[in-house]
């Protein structure tokens, strides 16, 4: 889930794509391996591709290279509650490629400014915990952050330095330990 309401993430768009491409390159992608879905969210959810959209690594890498991950930039406050509802009711279902015997890992990519307006109910957190075996929240940028409200593992990445490298290693470390 990528926060498309973020003004700060626009400047890091290529670094985010580069990191996601690096992660996909390092994983065994396919029907018997890892599956990757990408969604954007702001006031609603924008599907980039579902879990079962790619049957091999090359398809996924091509989609990531061609996907504009921040196409619906509205500059409104993001609604993480809507994103959680979409994940639990739609994205993480068999119709969209979810597999019963494989753990689901959810990653939110946002920034400190957007996260400060995020409010999740206890029910949102419970729904997400019941569907995903692990949740990671990545906050890219500087400033005060309340991304902890999304729960799970929280990583803050300053937007100076090598965002792509830091994001890649954080994501790979998290995914490989789930």
Image (cartoon, helix red, strand yellow):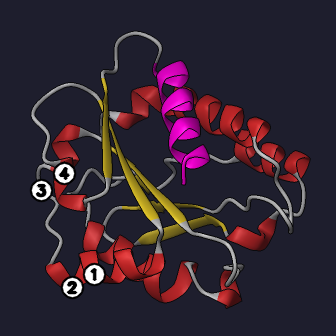
Task: Inspect this view and state whether residue 6 appears.
Answer: no
Image-based side of 34 in relation to 169, left or right: right
Image-based side of 149 in relation to 31, left or right: left
Q: Which residue is mark 4?
A: 148
**Residues at badges 4 and 1 in contact (C-beta under 8 Å)?**
no
Report, in whole angstroms, how far the alpha carbon at label 4 lies from the one at label 1: 15 Å
Residues shaded magenta: 163-178
Q: Which residue is mark 2?
A: 123
Nearest to the observer: residue 119 or residue 129: 129
**Residues at badges 4 and 3 in contact (C-beta under 8 Å)?**
no
Nearest to the observer: residue 127 or residue 81: 127
Front disc: 4 or 3 = 4
**Is 71 situated above or below 125?**
above
Q: Which residue is mark 1?
A: 126
Q: Which mark is residue 114?
A: none
**Is 78 situated above or below 19?**
below
Q: Earlier in the sequence, mark 3 or mark 2?
A: 3
Q: Earlier in the sequence, mark 4 or mark 2?
A: 2
């Amino acid at each position: 889930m990528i926060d498309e309401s973020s003004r700060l993430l626009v400047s890091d768009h290529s670094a985010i794509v580069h990191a996601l491409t690096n992660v996909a390159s390092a994983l065994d992608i396919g029907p018997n391996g890892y599956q990757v879905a990408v969604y954007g969210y702001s006031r609603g959810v924008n599907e980039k591709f579902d879990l079962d959209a790619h049957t091999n690594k090359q398809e996924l890498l091509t989609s990531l290279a061609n996907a504009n991950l921040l196409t619906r930039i509205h500059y409104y406050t993001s609604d993480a509650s809507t994103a959680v509802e979409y994940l639990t009711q739609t994205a993480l279902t068999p119709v969209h490629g979810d597999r019963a015997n494989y753990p689901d890992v959810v990653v939110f990519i946002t920034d400190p400014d957007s996260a400060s307006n995020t409010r999740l109910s206890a029910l949102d957190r419970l729904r997400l915990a019941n569907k995903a075996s692990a949740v990671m929240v990545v906050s890219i940028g500087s400033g005060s952050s309340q991304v902890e409200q999304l729960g799970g593992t929280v990583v803050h990445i300053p937007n100076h330095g090598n965002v792509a490298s830091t994001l890649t290693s954080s994501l790979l470390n998290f995914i490989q330990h789930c």
